[in-house]
Amino acid sequence: MKELITELLAGNRRALARLLTIVENKREGVDEALALLFSHTGHAWIIGVTGAPGTGKSTLVNALARAYRAQDKTVGIIAVDPTSPFSGGAILGDRIRMQELAGDSGVFIRSMATRGHLGGLARTTRDAVRVMDAAGFDIVLVETVGAGQSEVDIVRTAETTLVVEAPGLGDDVQAIKAGILEIADVLVVNKADRPGATNTVRSLKTMLELGHRAARNQFHHGQLLQPAPSGDTIDLWMPPIIQTVASENRGTAELVAAIEGHRRYLTDNDLLEQTERRHIEIELYDRLRDELMLRLLDVVPEAMLTDMIDKIQAREMDPQRVVELLLAQLPSP
Ligand SMILES: Nc1nc2c(ncn2[C@@H]2O[C@H](COP(=O)(O)OP(=O)(O)O)[C@@H](O)[C@H]2O)c(=O)[nH]1
Ligand SMILES: [Mg+2]
């Protein structure tokens, strides 16, 4: 394993691919691998790209990757999307665009299966990002379908999160439904070549301004959980709305500038450390929760769980009592 990590750090792509497979399938040695590479992480700029299916996330990721390559930055891509053209099955035009990247040694693309169970997906993705980070990529782009809590969890650990909308996908604005607007650092209205784009922009703007005002009031009442490290009152970040036509590479430069603007906002206000700390906090709690659950399931037979559910339903026991009973099954340290 040590050897494999050494190869990864030296930029060996085969080692990278192998480690990603180990992480994705939770193969033996995964914990050791992650422990060994951890001290080499924390350098990549991680950009989460989320939104409803078909909004153009993969196309956008592709356009962004090319823009960053033009700046001579190396790019790792993780697509957590079963319909991703990165994982094949795409229509021809999309596949051709992807292939341009595939021949470039400064880009590495990995799509992840979504068969992961509850919460597992967020963890696996986070670990995969970490492998890419240790491999030395300047930028890591993570594409997820913003449809549920686990997808939101994934992007919660990105430095900059893009929420992608597109006009003409049925409902007005998908972000409200999924509740992902609040995690957006940059809002992208892709498919701006389609009718209705201006309306999408307008409704997003209204929602943003409402949210921003609410957050500001909180700030003024001193309730913001994490004030600026400098002690100053800093302006809250207002997510810009960028219109793009990803399939024609239009608006990409503006989007790259917006991402850079967000990065500068975090850096200039000394918010990077604080952001990282929050990410670590979230991760630690996630891992603890997962680990405790696994340990519990190790010692509690499934029949017992079923029995407890019966008892709760029959009103013979209340849920909290059951929790305590189950926890009592854990071996004491
Ligand atoms: N008209 C138009 N089509 C686009 C645009 N961006 C992507 N598409 C197309 O929309 C479809 C879905 O794109 P994809 O990137 O796979 O969306 P994802 O599901 O969000 O990853 C593909 O056929 C793309 O070629 C755009 O800006 N305008
Ligand atoms: Mg996709």
Image (cartoon, rainbow, N blue to C red):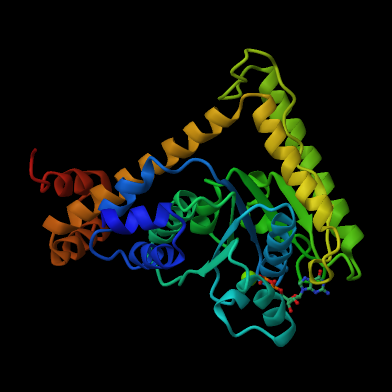
In which of the image's four quarters is ligand 2 placed?
bottom right
Q: Quadrant of residue 233?
A: top right
The count of marks equals 0
Residue at the outermost left position: 332
Q: Is residue 254 above or below residue 103?
A: above
Q: Is residue 238 above or below residue 248?
A: above
Looking at the picture, tell me which residue is in the foreground, 84 or 6: 6
Q: Quadrant of residue 331?
A: top left
Image location of residue 295, percent across then percent down: 18, 52
Image location of residue 284, percent across then percent down: 36, 40
Q: Is residue 26 above or below residue 152?
A: below
Looking at the picture, tell me which residue is in the foreground, 71 or 87: 71
Taking the image as shown, residue 125 lies to the left or right of residue 44, namely: left
Q: Residue at x 71, y 61 (%)?
A: 174
Q: Residue at x 84, y 70 (%)?
A: 248
Q: Residue at x 48, y 57 (%)?
A: 150
Image location of residue 30, percent across then percent down: 29, 58
Quarter of the image where the C terminus is located: top left
Looking at the picture, tell me which residue is in the foreground, 173 or 29: 29
Taking the image as shown, residue 114 lies to the left or right of residue 242, namely: left
Does residue 189 appear anywhere in the picture?
A: yes
Taking the image as shown, residue 156 lies to the left or right of residue 100, namely: left
Q: Quadrant of residue 214?
A: top right
Does residue 316 appear anywhere in the picture?
A: no
Image location of residue 200, percent across then percent down: 84, 58
Quarter of the image where the N terminus is located: bottom left
